Amino acid sequence: MVEGVRVDPAPRRRRRRQDSEQEILEAAERLLRERPFRELTVDELMAATTQSRTAFYRHFTSRQDLLIRLLSDLNQELWAVSEAWFGGSGDPLAQGREALERLAGVYQAHGPVLLALAEAAHHDDEVERVYDALVQGFVAATVARIERDAAAGLADVPHPEQVATALVWMTERHLAVAFGRPGTGPAERAAAVEALLVIWLRTLYGIGPAAGGRGPGA
């Protein structure tokens, strides 16, 4: 250190804290690939890190708090790959395929964790509340896209909110199950995307992904 120059230790402490927290989150994701959340204990989690058990509570108030943090991080990633479709207009075939392929990529990378989060929501009220809010955000964005496309004459969808709710929950469940176990390869990913694309395009626009034309026979 240069004589007379005081170095602020705060940034270094913040980096250490962030590194410590990230190590715990990464260990949790690894373990959630192997077992349900309800079977994961704080002791087991911290044994998979280089830190002590007490370090867990410097970052998280509970196991549920940890899970919600994981969910929040993955939610940001899911939004990042979907926002082009939500914010776009026109060319539903190309935009829809790109969005679903990128969405499937996130599920392929984090499928076991996303499935664990969905299953935990069935057993924990706090996680259920956060998970439902995440899904409802996607529903609202889908409704906005449907209404925009309807105004442009591209879509004719009765009860947009009900249709959007059904499509989003169907997509969440399909991808969670398809990629919820390790080992899903490119062929399975392509099949999952194509199945979802057929359903979304025919439901919203009356078109098929192969022909790309309007009308019930497309």
Image (cartoon, rainbow, N blue to C red):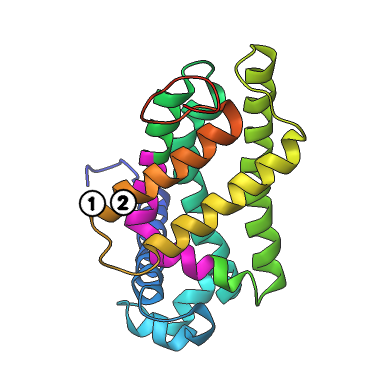
Q: Are marks 2 and 1 in contact (CB under 8 Å)?
A: yes
- What's the amino acid at mark 2? Arg
- Does residue 102 sit above or below 212 in this rendering? below
At 24% across and 43% down in the image, what residue appears? Answer: 3
At 36% across and 40% down in the image, what residue appears? Answer: 101
Where residue 187 sits in the image (x, y, percent)? 24, 52
Q: In front: 53, or 185?
A: 185
**In-image side of 174 versus 146 (left or right):** left
Q: In front: 133, or 72?
A: 133
Answer few, some or many: residues within 10 Å of disc 2's Cα (few below 14, many 20 plus, some between 14 and 19).
some
Answer few, some or many: residues within 10 Å of disc 1's Cα (few below 14, many 20 plus, some between 14 and 19).
few
Where residue 18 sits in the image (x, y, percent)? 40, 57
User: Magenta stretch?
Assistant: 101-117
- What's the amino acid at mark 1? Pro
Q: Which of the labelled discs sits on residue 90, or is there none?
A: none
Q: Residue at label 1?
A: 186
Q: Which of the labelled discs sits on residue 189, or is there none?
A: 2
